[in-house]
Each structure stands twice: as C-alpha cells, then as structure tokens.
Image (tube, rainbow, N blue to C red):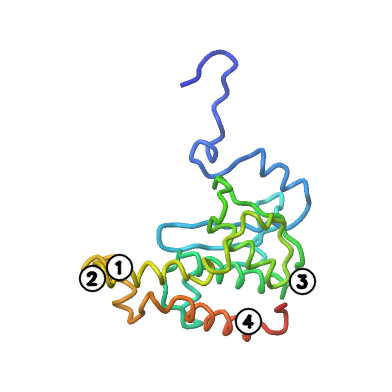
Amino acid sequence: MAHGPRYKVPRRRRREGKTDYRKRYKLVLSGHPIFVVRKSNKYVWVQIVKPQVQGDVVVAAAHSKELQKFGWKGSGNSLPAVYLTGMLAALRAKEKGIQYAAPNIGLHKPTKGARVFAAIKAANDVGLEVPMSEEVAPSEERIRGEHIASYAKMLKEQNPEEFQKRFSVLLKNGFDPENYPSHFEEVKSKILENYKQVAG
C-alpha cells in the first residue's frame, strides 16, 4: 500500500470500486443527462439521471425484472435482456423530452460487445442519442440471443444433463433457451407497441 506525507486516501466510493471521479467530473461539466448502466449477477438496470447539487436525480429508469410484464421469460442479465432494458429506459426518457444523454459505463472495461454497449445501442436504435462507436456494439445476432440458442442446442444434443443443469431456471419457467431469438423479437415488438408514440 502507498504511504508517505503526500499520499491521499482515495474517496470512499472509489475505494469501493463504485465511482471513477475523473470521468464523473467530465460528465457533470457536460451539462447533459447521463445514461447509466449497472448490473448484478441476476439483473441489470438502466437509468437516465441529471446531476444536481443535492445528488443525481433519476429522470427515467428500467430494471430487467420489468421485462416480465411484457412476457419475458429469459435471463435477467443476458445480452438480449440488457438490450431490451436499455430500450425501455430510453423510451421512457424520450417520453420526458430527453433526446441526448452522455454514456456512463462506470468502472466497466470498454470491451467490444459488452452488455453495457447493448443497452447503449438499444437507446440509439429508438432515437435517444447516446454516443458510442459502432465498433464496440454487439452484433445483431448476439443481441437476439442466437449465440445462446446455438449453445443450448449443442448442449442438449451432446450433454443433456449439463443442458438441464445450465438452463435449469429457464426450463423451470417453461422457456426453451433455443427459442431466444424469436422470443426476443416478440418482447421487443410488445415494448415498441407500448411506446409507439415515442419509438423511432
């Protein structure tokens, strides 16, 4: 650990791995709403916040658990779920008159195809401008969950026991992971229909 007369103890949220204060300083100075993506082991949530002196004010938000209202049966933190959650939050932000937001991926590494970029791509796809290089966005196939469906099919054929183990929660809910692409399109259509006044 560093020590000496010039050593400064990092702020608490930086020590806890929650906030990069240099990035946050630039975001606050921009004056724009901030598009925030956070995830846990089971879920993901997307918020559009406005920094205020008293703290961030959430203007619009969506949690992947809310996707169940639109019939979602897949995982709450899979790439398709992250995309749909980002879309839902962006549509709600547009309802509030927001057309632009600065991206904040927190302490996540900007890895190509990462889930955080799926949420940002979803926002751009429905007309909420959130700057992002197309090079880092996940492919359409991965967003639709085709990679999950292919893996599930392979596992079911080669190792049925492992298939049952890996997808036990989904199978218990009556969802076949091989149907991810069609199920994704179905839920996506329901969300867009529900927010058709601001979609596009």
Q: Nearer the viewer, mark 4 or mark 1?
A: 1
> Which structural element holds mark 3?
loop
- Residue 155, disc: 1
* Mark sitting earlier along the chain (4/1): 1
> Which structural element holds mark 1?
helix
- Residue type, label 1: Leu
Tell me if label 1 and label 2 are in contact, CB under 8 Å: yes
* Mark sitting earlier along the chain (3/4): 3
Tell me if label 4 and label 2 are in contact, CB under 8 Å: no
Residue drawn at x 64%, y 64% is 121
Q: How far across and down, in percent of the image, does residue 134 sit?
A: 67, 58
- Residue 20, disc: none
Residue drawn at x 66%, y 82% is 195
Residue 157 occupies quadrant: bottom left
* Mark sitting earlier along the chain (2/3): 3
Which residue bears the numbered disc 2?
Answer: 160
Cα separation, mark 1 vs mark 2, equals: 6 Å
Q: How crowded is mark 3: few (under 14 residues within 10 Å), some or many (20 or more)?
A: few
Residue drawn at x 29%, y 77% is 172
- Residue 97, disc: 3
Cα separation, mark 4 vs mark 2, equals: 36 Å
52 left or right of 152? right
Which residue bears the numbered disc 4?
Answer: 192
